[in-house]
Image (cartoon, grey):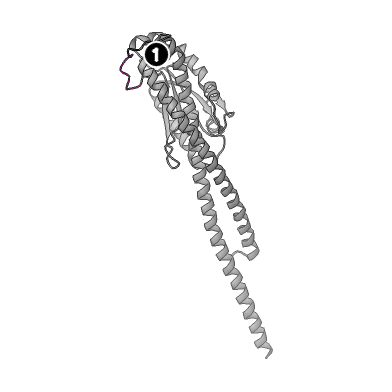
Amino acid sequence: MAKGSELKGRIKSVENTRKITRTLEMIATSKMKRSQDRVIAARPYARALADVISSLYSKDLEGDFPLLRQPKIVKNAAVLLLTSNRGMAGGFNANLIKEARALIARLEGEGTTVELHVSGRKGGGYFRYVARAMATSRTDIGDKPTASDAASLVDALMTQYAKGEIDAVYVVCAQYKSALSSPPVAERVLPVAPPASAAGQKNFLLFPDAGAILSELLPAYVRNAVYKALVETVAAEQAARRTAMKAATDNAGEMLNLLRRTYNRARQANITQEIAEIVGGAAALE
């Protein structure tokens, strides 16, 4: 059995660890609430953009807008992986990386050349470790992503797509459903596919015409899709970190209870041994 001084040191260490994990849990809870608000705010705008494009879309416009071009064969594709810069979030980043690897393997298995773009220190670190070439690796986007951050990630890819240098763009991100459910998903953001509900261009009086409106809306739609992926991934990250830190705090509490019981038993055994020695010594003197 460990000595009393050693057990006291371990108890102190676990107490300090529990303070840290509890603080991180509280911080993650606060950040998760703000991240949820950004997700809730982003979703209606995304739906509104999709509805407008659905109303304006017609088959005749595909030839005029490169972002609507639907390649028959995807020879070159770009994969944008969104991960976090920090760990201590359980399997959050590992699951995203696993999803990206599965997507890359599927595309390459179909004969597609894949260009990998990574946002987040965890994703970039993994692919550097496995010696996978990355076209870009970003670590400058924090836990408060903006529309400008989304544009900086996808604008160059839209230009490549418009020039025909790539045939598809996928985003691997977390889909925030609730604090306990945020599965990794791979979404295709280019080419822009007309919503399934599109029934053709409606009989509206438009100024400017549908083409002029779409020329502005299509890039905005793609940027917003990436922005929505960013805010949902951040919300999922904070939820995962909160869950992981709560579990760590609970485990530290259980460990403290075990160590304290062990320490009390050891101290009681020492006291009993000292009493027995005193009694034995007194008996020897009689």
- Front-most of 53 and 182? 53
Q: Position of residue 192 (x, y in %)?
A: 40, 18
Left or right? Give the position of 27 relative to 283: left
Q: Is residue 127 left or right of residue 213?
A: right
In depth, the one of 163 and 102 nearer the eye is: 163
Q: Is residue 220 visible?
A: yes
Q: Quadrant of the C terminus?
A: bottom right
Q: Residue at x 39, y 13 (%)?
A: 69
- The image quadrant where one finds the N terminus is bottom right
Mark 1: secondary structure: loop
Q: Is residue 71 visible?
A: no
Q: Which is nearer the eye, 106 or 251?
A: 251
**Tag 1: amino acid:** Arg
Q: What is the chief secondary structure element of the magenta stretch?
A: loop
User: Which residue is outermost to the front?
Assistant: 205
Residue 167 covered by magenta stretch: no
Nearest the viewer among 213 and 66 is 213
Give the image location of residue 101, x and y in percent. Answer: 45, 31
Identify the residue at horizontal 34%, vertical 9% (top origin): 60
Look at the picture and state if 165 lies above or below 36: above
Q: Quadrant of residue 210?
A: top left
Residue reaching furthest bottom? 286
* Residue 56 place in picture, x, y as percent: 37, 14
Q: Is residue 206 above or below residue 128?
A: above
Give the residue number, with chain letter if any, for mark 1. 69
**30 versus 72 height, above or below:** below
Q: How far across and down, in percent of the image, does residue 140 sit?
A: 59, 28
- Name the residue at the right extreme: 285
Crowding near the residue tagged with mark 1, few <14, some 14–19, many ≥20 C-alpha atoms within 10 Å: many
> What residue range appears in magenta?
195-202
- Outermost residue, left direction? 199
